[in-house]
Image (cartoon, rainbow, N blue to C red):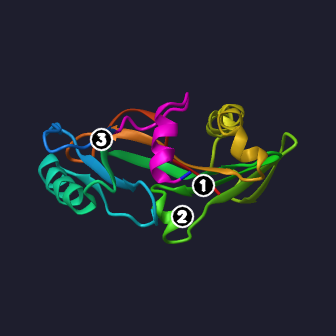
């Protein structure tokens, strides 16, 4: 399952996900919001694809139009309102255990800069910690883990083959055009892939 399939799987799941839409030249991006634009290809290498994060509607549309022309019919361009990540991480669900890694702020701090606050391994209902045990509150950990059963069911064919499901998540806030937080913190998943 590549990034493109992962976007669709998440969209059709019961998990809280970003409300992405496929970008077209006539797509309307609210000028009062900041936007994230991402790409996904039908086949081939789908790591480190072009993306734009947290930009105004004018810049986001220019970027999306250029990328749409570049990838042509080889994939899609998606967009969704930018959010401010307070904590982020990965959730790797195996048949018999789960690994959660978490980092402060954006996920890029983990995947690009190898920063990490905590790794939690949940096996047979018991959690073992490597790092800051206090980083995720009990409520945050409970919210993340509440989706494991659904994930195992949704991706059971892959898990049965001995693979795992790797999801990216954040505890986030909506924001205005000036990156001021709006509303309450929420959990959101925004990428899934089989590993």
Please report contact status of discs 2 and 1: CB closer than 8 Å, yes or no.
yes
What residue appears at the point 42 percent right and 54 percent down from the top-left corner?
Answer: 42
Q: Is residue 118 magenta?
A: no
Q: Badge 1 is on which residue?
A: 102
Q: State the mark number for residue 110.
A: 2
The foreground one among 106 and 152 is 152
Look at the picture and state if 63 lies above or below 24: below
What residue appears at the point 70 percent right and 51 percent down from the top-left corner?
Answer: 164
Mark-to-mark CA distance, 2 and 1: 8 Å
Q: Badge 3 is on which residue?
A: 22
The quarter of the image holding the C terminus is bottom right
Residue 76, image x, y percentages: 32, 50
Q: Quadrant of residue 116?
A: bottom right
The foreground one among 191 and 135 is 191
Look at the picture and state if 147 lies above or below 190: above
In the rendered view, does 127 fall on the left or right side of 10?
Answer: right
Element type where label 2 sits in the image: helix
In this rendering, does residue 187 appear at all? no
Q: Which residues are magenta?
A: 2-20
């Amino acid at each position: 399952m590549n990034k493109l399939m992962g976007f669709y799987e998440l969209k059709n799941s019961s998990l809280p996900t970003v409300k992405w839409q496929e970008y077209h030249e006539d797509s309307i991006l609210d000028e009062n919001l900041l936007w994230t634009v991402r790409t996904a290809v039908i086949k081939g290498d789908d790591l480190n694809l072009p993306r734009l994060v947290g930009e105004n509607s004018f810049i986001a549309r220019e970027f999306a139009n250029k990328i749409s022309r570049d990838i042509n019919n080889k994939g899609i361009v998606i967009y969704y309102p930018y959010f401010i990540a307070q904590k982020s991480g990965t959730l790797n669900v195996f048949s018999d255990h789960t690994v959660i890694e978490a980092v402060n702020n954006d996920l890029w701090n983990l995947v690009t800069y190898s920063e990490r606050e905590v790794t939690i391994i949940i096996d047979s209902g018991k959690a073992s910690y490597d790092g800051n045990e206090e980083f995720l509150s009990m409520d945050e950990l409970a919210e993340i883990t509440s989706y494991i059963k659904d994930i195992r069911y949704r991706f059971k064919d892959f898990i049965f083959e001995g693979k795992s499901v790797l999801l990216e998540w954040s505890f986030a806030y909506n924001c205005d055009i000036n990156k001021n937080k709006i509303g309450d913190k929420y959990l959101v998943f925004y990428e899934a892939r089989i590993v």
